[in-house]
């Protein structure tokens, strides 16, 4: 299996994302509610071949460093999409798109909170929990309409949020709200609520993720969700 370089991938794909800020208490939090990887001759509004759910946006940021995302209160609507510099995880997803001959891939997260490391992410989650603010997650009750609209397509749904214990509560909540009739795939992690992350950093493991995901996408019977939900309910 050819492991395409960043230079080759950039010739075929681009990434756009929508960023916003929330103000909770006296602090603002940078968020990203959606990112879209697409081939250069396709549009962001084209129906995605798949939607992938990950933990959080990491340190993803706009290409234009002077861009200031709008502060959003309540429903997240009409937030502009801007170009972003692709990262290693997004490049790995481009490789999957290449193998599957996909044109558009939508990325959402258990939490929209942008954070470059899990310790900082945990601190932000704890801060928002202190205010009982759950709107940073597309799986919160306040964002049912947004989530249902996103899932109301023929796109495949891929779970790939990793297995860090910090996200267990978010993951279990998400699993309980996934559409029952949709094709759902994901490579099981060590815990039944966890799913292997696309970019495990080591090149050989990255290749293994691509191979295993390719195999599952070609043979899936969508029983992933049921087993994972049972584990969360224990």
Image: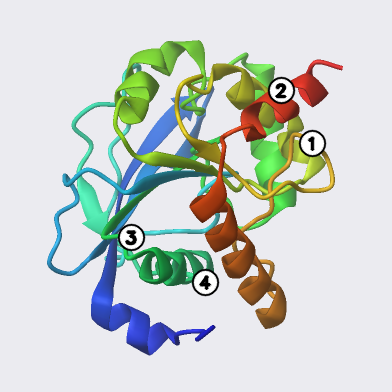
Residue 178 position (above or below residue 41): above
Quadrant where the C terminus sits is top right
Pointer 1 or 2: first along the chain: 1
Spatial CA distance of label 1 from label 4 is 26 Å
Please tell me which of labels 3 and 4 falls first in the chain.
3
Q: Residues within 10 Å of mark 2 (few under 14, many from 20)?
A: many
Ranked by sequence position, the earlier of labels 4 and 2 is 4
Q: Are marks 1 and 3 in contact (CB under 8 Å)?
A: no
Quarter of the N terminus within the rendering: bottom right
Q: Would you name the residue on which mark 2 appears?
A: 229
Residue 88, image x, y percentages:
52, 72
What SS does tag 1 mark?
loop
Height in image: 69 above or below 176?
below
**Residue 100: assigned label:** none
Identified at 31% across, 18% down, the residue is: 75
| Residue 148: x %, y % from top left | 36, 20
Please indicate whether residue 40 sits to the left or right of residue 214 in the image: left
Instruction: Give the image location of residue 115, x and y in percent.
Output: 58, 51
Q: CA distance from mark 3 to mark 4?
A: 15 Å
Look at 76% across and 46% down and name the residue there.
163
How many tags in the picture?
Answer: 4
Secondary structure, mark 3, is loop
**Secondary structure beneath label 4:** helix
Residue in view at x 23 percent, y 26 percent? 77
Q: Residue at x 26, y 77 (%)?
A: 12
Residue under pointer 1: 192
Q: Which residue is mark 3?
A: 62
- Tell me how far mark 1 sits from mark 3, CA to CA: 34 Å
Q: In this rendering, which labeled residue sits more in front, label 3 or label 2?
A: 2
Q: Secondary structure at mark 2?
A: helix
Q: Considering only order in the chain, which callout, 2 or 3, is on the residue closer to the N terminus?
A: 3
């Amino acid at each position: 299996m050819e492991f395409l370089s960043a230079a080759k991938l950039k010739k075929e794909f681009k990434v756009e994302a929508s960023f916003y800020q929330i103000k909770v208490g006296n602090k603002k939090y940078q968020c990203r509610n959606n990112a879209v990887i697409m081939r250069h001759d396709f549009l962001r509004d084209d129906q995605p071949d798949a939607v992938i759910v990950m933990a959080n946006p990491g340190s993803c940021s706009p290409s234009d460093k002077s861009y200031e995302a709008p502060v959003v209160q309540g429903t997240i609507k009409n937030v502009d999409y801007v170009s972003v510099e692709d990262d290693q995880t997004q490049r790995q997803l481009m490789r999957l798109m290449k193998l599957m001959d996909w044109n558009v891939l939508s990325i959402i997260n258990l939490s929209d909170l942008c954070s470059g490391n899990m310790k900082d992410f945990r601190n932000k989650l704890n801060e928002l929990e202190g205010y009982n603010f759950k709107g940073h997650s597309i799986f919160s009750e306040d964002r049912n309409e947004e989530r249902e609209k996103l899932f109301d397509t023929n796109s495949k749904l891929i779970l790939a949020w990793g297995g860090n214990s910090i996200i267990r509560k978010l993951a279990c909540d998400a699993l309980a709200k996934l559409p029952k009739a949709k094709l759902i795939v994901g490579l099981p992690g060590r815990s039944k609520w966890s799913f292997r992350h696309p970019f495990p950093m080591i090149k050989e493991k990255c290749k293994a993720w691509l191979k295993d995901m390719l195999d599952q996408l070609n043979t899936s019977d969508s029983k992933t969700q049921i087993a994972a939900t049972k584990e969360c309910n224990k």
